[in-house]
Image (cartoon, rainbow, N blue to C red):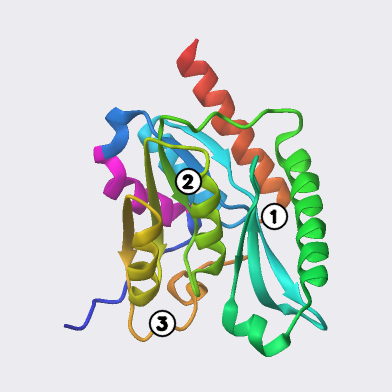
């Protein structure tokens, strides 16, 4: 069956659509966790619609030796950082264990830097025992989000849910093993790129991330007061 093409205006529009598909989870008071930077505008609208807390989950791609744009894997932040390797690329490039460890340390240092830029001294919101919804603006290969889900599962959420506007069907099928539920609005075939399903898909700036997080924090604080 041919799917009707789905086109989002921008990331916040995608978040509004995604929030409707997640509305049934609002009574569980979920924690919405965004992958920066592109996942933040999507997650912001989800958190606002569900009157939920918003936080970040940092994941960084590990570049290959001599081919930084070719990811050999990804590392997710947390008390126990999770490394997920792309075995096929690792076989092709043959990085040494020492290289992988050094690249992992480098990316974790960059995660620390970005956390301070985006959140300042704000501590991460506790995950244990909560319904956690991991949100991004879309998925292409799934390597980064797989590391994110593995990292988040180590924090012992009550339920772990992945929610994205668009992704390939075969990637979504593989990711179902990593969490309790996957919600994806559109699984096009053939799949070309995440940005092909947005009218506007400019790079999300650090300034927008900070502004949206501060707005979400202020709105939640006002509701809690």
Asked if residue 16 is among those painted magenta in the image, a careful observer would answer yes
Q: Which residues are magenta?
A: 12-24
Sequence order check, earlier mark of 3 and 1:
3
Residue at position x 28%, y 40% from top? 23
Q: In the picture provided, is 74 more to the left or to the right than 189?
A: right
- Judging by the rendered image, the residue that carries numbered circle 3 is 191
Nearer-the-camera pick, 4 or 154:
154
Name the outermost residue toward the front: 97
- Of the numbered discs 1 and 2, the one sitting upstream in the chain is 2
For residue 70, what is the image quadrant? Answer: bottom right
Relative side of 152 to 100, left or right: left
Numbered badge on residue 177: none
Q: Counting residues from the N terminus, which is met first, the one under dot 2 or under dot 3?
A: 2
Q: Write the residue at 47% across / 64% down.
A: 138
Q: CA distance from mark 2 to mark 3?
A: 28 Å
Position in image of residue 143 (x %, y %): 54, 68
Q: Does residue 203 appear in the picture of this structure?
A: no
Q: Give the total of numbered labels.
A: 3
Task: Pick whichever, 199 or 190, lies toward us.
Answer: 190
- State the residue position of label 2: 153
User: Are there few (<14), some (14-19), or many (20+) residues within 10 Å of tag 1?
Assistant: few
Q: CA distance from mark 3 to mark 1?
A: 26 Å
- Up the image or down, 14 lies above or below 33; here it is below
Q: How much space separates mark 1 and mark 2, taking CA atoms?
A: 28 Å
**Residue 179 at x, y = what percent?**
38, 52
Report helix, strand or loop for mark 1. loop
211 on left or right of 102? left
Tell me, for residue 205, which label it has, or none: 1
Q: Is 171 positioned to the left or the right of 122 in the image?
A: left
Nearer the observer: mark 1 or 2; the answer is 2
Q: Secondary structure at mark 3?
A: loop
């Amino acid at each position: 069956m041919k799917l009707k093409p789905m086109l989002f205006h921008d990331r916040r529009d995608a978040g509004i659509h995604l929030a409707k598909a997640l509305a049934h989870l609002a009574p569980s008071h979920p924690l919405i966790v965004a992958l920066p930077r592109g996942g933040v505008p999507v997650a912001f609208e989800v958190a606002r619609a569900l009157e939920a807390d918003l936080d970040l989950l940092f994941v960084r791609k590990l570049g290959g030796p001599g081919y930084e744009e070719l990811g050999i894997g990804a590392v997710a932040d947390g008390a126990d950082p999770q490394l997920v390797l792309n075995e096929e690329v690792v076989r092709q490039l043959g990085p040494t264990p020492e290289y992988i460890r050094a690249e992992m340390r480098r990316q974790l240092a960059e995660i620390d830097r970005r956390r301070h830029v985006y959140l300042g001294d704000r501590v991460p919101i506790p995950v244990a025992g909560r319904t956690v919804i991991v949100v991004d603006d879309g998925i292409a290969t799934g390597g980064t989000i797989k590391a994110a889900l593995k990292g988040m599962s180590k924090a012992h959420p009550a339920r772990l849910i992945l929610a994205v506007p668009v992704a390939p069907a075969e990637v979504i099928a593989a990711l179902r093993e990593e969490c309790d539920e996957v919600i994806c609005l559109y699984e096009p075939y053939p799949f070309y790129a995440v940005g092909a399903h947005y009218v506007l898909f400019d790079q999300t700036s650090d300034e927008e991330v900070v502004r949206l997080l501060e707005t979400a924090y202020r709105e939640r604080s006002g509701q809690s007061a």
